[in-house]
Image (cartoon, grey):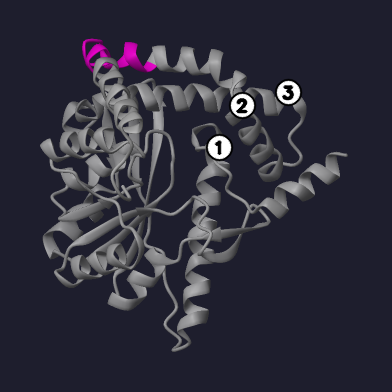
């Protein structure tokens, strides 16, 4: 938060935080599956009425140009259902753990090995299914890890999010600018791991292909892995049914060490995008489609093609 907010802004934030508390309290009174089902129904009904629906529709056209109208409509409906489930499950994340029986971890032995060796690792993933579940799987494995996230615009809500996650061991860190990058470097030097989402637009990032279109992609995860010789360890999460999940620990992404750091970095970022794209193609209804992933020029070109 830059500077002191106006009284009106501060009051608005406090009202929003109170509403967040009330909604969270109500959802926590419900069985997990019921809360998840309610979110799916609400977002399925209301999502198409929002401006985000248009964003998702354009993204689907870019990613799957051969999908017909009926297929796009079905995918749009399914992604709204998944997003609604994810948002309504958010206050109940402490119940979505491997210990709860709701989360299966495929490749658990790899996480156990990382924890046992105390090897600094760069975990990467995307906004798949309920992405909060992945942090729980990492912490449950006993890995000392800083989970990066985008801080909420409302500082009161953001504080609540961080405090609730801290209660069950998840340390959230929102890196900003050079200071944030420095803190991540210090964490890696201490032998800690870091976890980052690597599937959203990053204007200062490297340009790499994503579904055949140029996309600005954060190079930070690859840069950290190259600098420390660390594993670049991808994870994904799949929704099994309702509020039950499978976290998949994939094979590490191999990084080139040719001596040409710029080329190695670009190659690594391309591999990250390829990983994310493959997961989206496998389970397209479970990705976060309501985000402007590509540059404005790509969307302009799509509009021109459609006439």
Q: Residues within 10 Å of mark 3 (few under 14, many from 20)?
A: few
> Hey, which residue is sitting farthest right in the picture?
307
Tell me the number on the disc at residue 289: 1
Q: Position of residue 9 (x, y in %)?
A: 35, 32
Tell me the number on the disc at residue 76: 2
Q: Is residue 268 left or right of residue 173?
A: right
Q: Residues within 10 Å of mark 2 (few under 14, many from 20)?
A: many
Quarter of the image with the C terminus is: top right
Q: Main secondary structure of the magenta part?
A: helix
- Residue at 36% x, 46% y: name it: 150
Is residue 52 rendered magenta in the image?
A: no
- Residue at 77% x, 30% y: name it: 68
In front here: 173 or 139? 173
In front here: 307 or 192? 307
The answer for how far apart the CA atoms under marks 1 and 2 are is 9 Å
Please say if the residues under marks 1 and 2 sit with CB atoms less than 8 Å apart.
yes
The answer for how far apart the CA atoms under marks 3 and 2 are is 10 Å
Report the span colored magenta: 25-36
The answer for how far apart the CA atoms under marks 3 and 1 are is 17 Å
Q: Which residue is mark 3?
A: 70
Helix, strand or loop under label 1:
loop
């Amino acid at each position: 938060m830059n500077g002191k907010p106006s009284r009106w802004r501060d009051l608005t934030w406090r009202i929003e935080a109170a509403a967040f508390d009330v909604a969270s309290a109500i959802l926590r009174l419900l069985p997990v599956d019921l809360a998840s089902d309610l979110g799916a129904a609400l977002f399925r009904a209301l999502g198409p009425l929002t401006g985000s629906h248009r964003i998702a529709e354009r993204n689907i056209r870019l990613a799957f140009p051969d999908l017909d109208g009926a297929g796009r409509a079905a995918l749009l409906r399914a992604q709204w259902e998944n997003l609604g489930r994810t948002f309504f499950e958010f206050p109940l994340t402490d119940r979505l753990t491997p210990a709860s029986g709701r989360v299966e971890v495929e490749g658990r032995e790899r996480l156990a090995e990382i924890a046992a060796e105390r090897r600094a690792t760069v975990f990467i993933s995307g906004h798949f299914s309920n992405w909060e579940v992945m942090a729980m799987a990492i912490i449950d494995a006993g890995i000392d890890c800083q989970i990066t996230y985008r801080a909420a615009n409302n500082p009161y809500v953001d504080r609540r999010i961080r405090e609730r996650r801290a209660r069950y061991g998840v340390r959230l860190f929102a890196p900003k600018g050079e200071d944030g990058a420095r803190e991540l470097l210090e964490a890696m030097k201490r032998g800690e791991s870091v976890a980052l989402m690597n599937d959203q637009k990053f204007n200062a990032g490297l340009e790499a292909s994503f579904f055949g279109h140029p996309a600005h992609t954060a190079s930070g995860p690859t840069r950290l892995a190259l600098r420390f010789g660390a594993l670049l360890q991808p994870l994904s999460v799949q929704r099994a049914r309702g509020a039950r999940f499978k976290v998949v620990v994939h094979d590490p992404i191999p990084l080139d060490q040719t001596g040409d750091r710029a080329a190695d970095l670009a190659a690594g970022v391309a591999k990250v995008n390829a990983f994310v794209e493959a997961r989206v193609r496998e389970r397209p209804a479970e990705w976060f489609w309501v985000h402007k992933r590509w540059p404005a020029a790509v969307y302009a070109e799509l509009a021109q093609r459609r006439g």
